[in-house]
Amino acid sequence: MKKGFTALLLATIFPTASVALSPLEREILEELSCEVSPMSLEILTELTEAKKIIPEDNIGYDSLSCWTLLGGLNVAGMRFDSICAYEEDPELQRAHPEFYYRGPGTSPGQHLSLGTSVSVTALVDWSRSIFGPGKVSSAISSDGSILEGLNDVTCSRFLAASPRP
C-alpha cells in the first residue's frame, strides 16, 4: 500500500517529472514520505553500487552511519550531499556491518536523513512541495544536523509514529 500511495502522490505533484524520476529517487522519496519507519538497506546498497558512497568511509555518529554522497545526489530537483541511516533490526545489523553498527547508549531509532547545503528555507519549500505541510517542521533540521554545515530532511520511527496535523 505504501508504494502505491507514494506513486500516486508523486504523480499528482510531478505529473510529468514523476515519470523522469529514477528508481533510486522514487525509493528515497518513498522513505522520506515517512508514512512508516524508514528502511535504508536498499538505498544504501544502490548508492554503493552506483559508487555514490563507500561503505568503509562511514563517518558515523552515535550509532548513525553517515556518508558523504560522492558527486552529490539529485532527488526530485534537490541536491543532497550526505546520507545517514540507522537500522534497529539486530539481524540486519549483523548481516550488513558495512552499513550499520550499534554504539553504546540509547538507540537513535530507525532513521534515514539526507543532508544538503541549500538553505533551510529552500529545503522546507522542496519538502512541502513534495510531501505537503504535514511533518515539515519536525522533518527539517539545521541546528541539529548530523554533519556540520548541512541541513537535513529526516524520517525516523519517531516521525512516522507521530500524527499529521
Image (cartoon, rainbow, N blue to C red):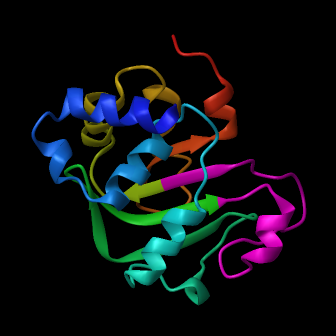
Q: Is residue 76 left or right of residue 104?
A: left
Q: Is residue 91 magenta?
A: yes
Left or right relative to 85: residue 96: right
Query: What span is colored magenta in the figure?
Result: 86-113
Query: Does residue 155 appear in the picture of this structure?
Result: yes
Q: Residue furthest top?
A: 165
x, y percentage for residue 54?
Answer: 50, 86
**x, y percentage for residue 58?**
60, 80
Q: Observer-nearest residue: 134 or 27? A: 27
In the picture as drawn, the residue positioned furthest to the bottom comes out as: 56
Residue ID at (45%, 39%): 3
Task: Give how far across and how far down residue 72 sits, in percent.
Answer: 30, 71
Residue appearing at x 31%, y 42% in the figure? 123
Residue 141 makes an appearance in the image: no
Above or below residue 149? Residue 118 is above
Q: Residue at x 24, y 41 (%)?
A: 122
Q: Is residue 163 above or below residue 123?
A: above
Q: Main secondary structure of the magenta part?
A: loop
Determine whether 118 is above or below 141 in the image: below
Determine if the magenta segment contains residue 40.
no
Q: Residue 159's spot in the image, x, y percent? A: 62, 32
Residue 29 shown left or right of residue 2 in the figure: left
Q: Nearer the viewer, residue 9 or 86?
A: 9
30 or 103, which lies in front? 30
Describe residue 137's horizontal placement relative to residue 24 as left or right.
right
Tell me the quarter of the picture where residue 22 sits. bottom left
**Count of numbered circles in the view:** 0
Residue sitting at 56 percent across and 58 percent down?
Answer: 146
